[in-house]
């Protein structure tokens, strides 16, 4: 018995039915992505009386370092004050530890503190440049907790943060908060009655990370216990909100250890992006890999990195729960790594090797599996997708006409879906070109990481829909199954090439298999695909894609404010939105193919109008505000020999208005009648050597300043030029003499 044909719903009714899914999916992803624990205030649990990690205590430490002491640039008085304060905290905790051990002599716990001091030099390669660093009388604070035996000390986990900060940032997040996390972890471990470490844990409060990792170099190359380190947990911050991101994980053992934390947040994609060098940044983690050949985890708070290395990096701008999230995860890691189940003895023999492990969070589960498992799983999914596509294939030709082959239909579907992807890319790049080059309104999205979605999302959808007008009619069933086959194939191919990011396409393709099987059960051949199938097929792309979008824009939108004027920031952000939106809504093509060409034209016109309205709205926005500031670099330089003065001003982004600002500064401060022009920024521009090699990102101006009044006085009467040893050789026709210059001060000859 054949099934009763169903009446076709229009696009509006169909979208209204699916609307709850399109709202619930991103909302769930948002809550899961940005969710933070409730901050804990009490130092001890009021019920169990056991010590607990307290965010309030962490922030108190961070506030003292960042605001009571202030910015701690290496070599400054504030830097020395920070070093002395952390040393005092470490000594206090050691005293508490010794008191507890005396009170309970059966407890196997030893606490040791070192105030390391040393000098050294090292080569530092960054941004394609080679630098040689030298440091003198640098200090570190080192604390080790162990069971007091040589066996317990031979394999250790190292936790690292840095006490210094960079000018002009107070460094509440970077890196005073991680320092507070480590101090709290020390306190809780020491005061936990039944905690006895099977393996040692070393806390390194290094004093010079911002000066290109001198502190970690000093420890790794000169401290006597450095050779006992088997793995590293590095704590950093490039932002002030959201959970800390695991962006480097260098062994399968440590990834599995990280899976045991209460709130894991990281993926193989972040790991591969950072290790690829796309993001020109680095941490102390490099020194531990380079000089100790150890594996580990590199974690950092990255949300709201607009405040990274800025004056507003204050405790008041740290989101509640950020410190608690990091501290809970670090504490759980230390409990595991110092237990009898620790992988430290195994890591002692393996050292640093590139991990062959896929890891990511999926609907509340932190999944970890090997590359081998991934290759088998993704390939099997591709084969199953082919079987389902063939088994559910419906010949679109009428019964009395010659049909087309399955392969031929799949090729049509691939062309249609590929065309939509290309169309989305064209759409966002056209809008980016207009905003940047025609209207001069680039960076209009900069003040919110989500703003680019509202500007370039409609453009991506407009381009994808317009492409289907060119491709023409392709059966809905064909495009649906083609997406399943293409995504599963690409997921398997990328994984076979040794790139773990192929898992992203795997998790979006596998739900399409049951979706097509269900459609075969619910509908008759030739019917529209069931909306239930769309719902099943869209759930994972909506949730996973939204999570991916949040992670990427959190990093890259603020990053455009410090990558230089020459970087095509508008096009970078536009293409990020275009690609991820294509991933989030993969079933757009089959959905529009179920309707007539007339409806498709209306949809294209409507989305084009939405795109135009979005552009108009964004043209009225300012790129910067009080909490999303432009980075302006200023140097006032005086030549004490020539008395010349110059004002150097530079920007590090491509937002409009900087050159006008430079002209206004010149008008106000420079000598009259001088037209400001940019100077060449290359390796030979010594004016900006203080921030080399980051100076490569700058667009600098150099202004002549009027001479100071004291430099405009007549020449000092003591200034004399005389000649002595004056000899004339009339035969040779030569004269020789010695000039004697008497100059009141410094002179360059």
Image: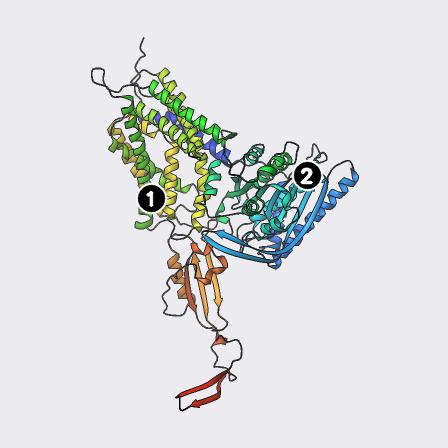
Give the colour scheme shown: rainbow
Res. 93 in view = no
Q: Residue at x 57, y 45 (%)?
A: 288
Residue 705 appears left or right of 406: right
Looking at the image, the residue that sits furthest to the bottom is 730
| Quarter of image, res 603 | top left
Q: What residue is drawn where x is 45% and y is 26%?
A: 376
User: Residue 438, image x and y in percent?
Assistant: 30, 50
Image x and y of residue 725, in percent? 49, 88
Circle 2: is it few (<14), some (14-19), or many (20+) Cα within 10 Å?
A: many
Furthest toward the top, the residue is: 1
In the displayed structure, does residue 23 sit left or right of residue 248? left
Helix, strand or loop at disc 1?
A: helix
Q: Give the number of callouts.
A: 2
Residue 154 to residue 544: above or below: below
Placement of the N terminus among the 4 image quadrants: top left
Q: As rendered, which of 400 and 137 lies closer to the eye?
A: 137
Label ID, residue 429: none
Residue 168 x/y as whole percent:
53, 56
Label 1: how many residues lie within 10 Å, few (<14), some (14-19) or many (20+)? Answer: many
- The reply to whether dot 1 and dot 2 touch (C-beta < 8 Å) is no
- Decide if residue 482 is in sight here: yes
Q: Which residue is mark 1?
A: 615
Mark linked to residue 189: 2
Q: Nearer the viewer, residue 221 or 89?
A: 221
Left-right relation of 31 to 190? left
Whole-Å distance between the Cαs marked 1 and 2?
55 Å
């Amino acid at each position: 018995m054949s099934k009763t044909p169903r009446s076709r719903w229009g696009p509006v009714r169909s979208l209204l039915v699916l609307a709850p899914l399109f709202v619930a999916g991103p909302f769930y992803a948002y809550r899961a992505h940005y969710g933070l624990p409730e901050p804990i205030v009490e130092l001890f649990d009021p019920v169990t009386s056991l010590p607990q990690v307290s965010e309030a205590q962490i922030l108190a430490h961070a506030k003292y370092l960042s605001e009571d002491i202030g910015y701690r640039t290496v070599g400054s008085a504030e830097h020395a004050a920070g070093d002395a304060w952390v040393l005092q905290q470490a000594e206090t905790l050691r005293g508490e530890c010794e008191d507890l051990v005396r009170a309970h002599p059966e407890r196997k716990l030893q606490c040791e503190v070192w105030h390391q001091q040393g000098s050294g030099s090292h080569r530092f390669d960054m941004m394609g440049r080679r630098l040689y660093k030298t440091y003198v009388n640098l200090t570190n604070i080192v604390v080790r907790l162990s069971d007091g035996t040589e066996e317990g000390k031979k394999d250790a986990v190292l936790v690292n943060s840095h006490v210094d900060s960079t000018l002009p940032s107070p460094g509440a997040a970077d890196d005073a908060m991680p320092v507070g996390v480590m101090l709290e972890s020390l306190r809780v471990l020491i005061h936990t009655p039944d905690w006895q470490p099977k393996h040692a844990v070393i806390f390194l409060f290094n004093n010079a990370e911002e000066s290109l990792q001198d502190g970690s170099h000093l420890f790794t190359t000169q401290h006597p216990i450095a050779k006992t380190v088997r793995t590293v947990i590095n704590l950093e911050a490039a932002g002030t909100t959201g959970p800390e991101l695991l962006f480097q994980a260098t062994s399968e053992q440590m990834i599995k250890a990280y899976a045991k934390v209460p709130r894991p947040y990281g993926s193989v994609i972040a790991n591969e992006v950072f290790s690829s060098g796309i993001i020109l940044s680095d941490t102390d983690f490099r020194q531990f890999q380079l000089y100790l050949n150890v594996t580990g985890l590199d974690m950092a708070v990255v949300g709201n990195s607009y405040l990274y290395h800025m004056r507003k990096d204050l405790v008041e701008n740290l989101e509640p729960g950020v410190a608690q999230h990091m501290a809970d995860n670090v504490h759980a890691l230390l409990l595991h790594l110092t237990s009898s189940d620790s992988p430290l003895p195994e890591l002692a023999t393996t050292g640093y090797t590139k991990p062959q492990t896929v890891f990511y969070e999926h609907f509340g589960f932190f999944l970890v599996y090997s590359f081998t498992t991934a290759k088998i799983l993704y390939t099997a999914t591709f084969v199953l997708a082919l079987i389902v596509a063939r088994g559910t294939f419906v010949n679109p030709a009428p019964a009395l006409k010659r049909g087309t082959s399955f392969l031929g239909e799949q090729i049509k579907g691939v062309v249609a879906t590929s065309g939509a992807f290309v169309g989305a890319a064209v759409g966002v790049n056209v809008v980016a070109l207009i905003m940047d080059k025609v209207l001069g309104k680039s960076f209009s999205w900069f003040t919110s990481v989500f703003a680019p979605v509202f500007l370039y999302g409609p453009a991506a959808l407009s381009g994808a829909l317009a492409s289907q007008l060119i491709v023409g009619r392709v059966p809905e069933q064909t495009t649906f199954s083609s997406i399943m086959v293409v995504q599963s194939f690409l997921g398997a191919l990328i994984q076979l090439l040794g790139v773990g990011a192929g898992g992203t396409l795997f998790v979006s393709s596998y739900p399409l298999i049951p979706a097509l099987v269900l459609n075969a059960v619910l509908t008759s051949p030739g019917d529209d695909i069931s909306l239930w199938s769309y719902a099943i097929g869209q759930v994972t792309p909506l949730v996973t894609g939204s999570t991916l979008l949040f992670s990427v824009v959190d990093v890259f939108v603020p990053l455009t404010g410090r990558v230089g004027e020459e970087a095509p920031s508008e096009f970078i952000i536009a293409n990020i939105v275009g690609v991820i939106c294509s991933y989030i809504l993969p079933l757009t093509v089959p959905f529009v193919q179920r309707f007539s060409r007339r409806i498709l034209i209306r949809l294209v016109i409507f989305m084009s109008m939405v795109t135009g309205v979005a552009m108009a709205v964004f043209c009225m926005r300012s790129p910067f505000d009080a909490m999303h500031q432009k980075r302006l670099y200023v140097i006032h330089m005086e030549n004490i020999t020539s008395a010349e003065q110059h004002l150097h001003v530079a920007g590090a982004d491509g937002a409009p208005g900087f050159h006008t600002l430079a002209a206004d500064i010149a008008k106000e401060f420079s000598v009259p009648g001088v037209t400001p022009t940019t100077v060449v920024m290359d390796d030979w521009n010594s004016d900006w050597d203080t921030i080399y090699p980051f100076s490569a990102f700058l667009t600098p101006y150099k202004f002549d300043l009027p001479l100071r009044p004291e430099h405009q006085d007549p020449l000092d009467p003591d200034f004399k030029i005389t000649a002595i040893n004056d000899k004339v050789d009339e035969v040779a026709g030569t004269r020789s003499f010695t000039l004697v210059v008497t100059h009141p001060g410094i002179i360059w000859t």
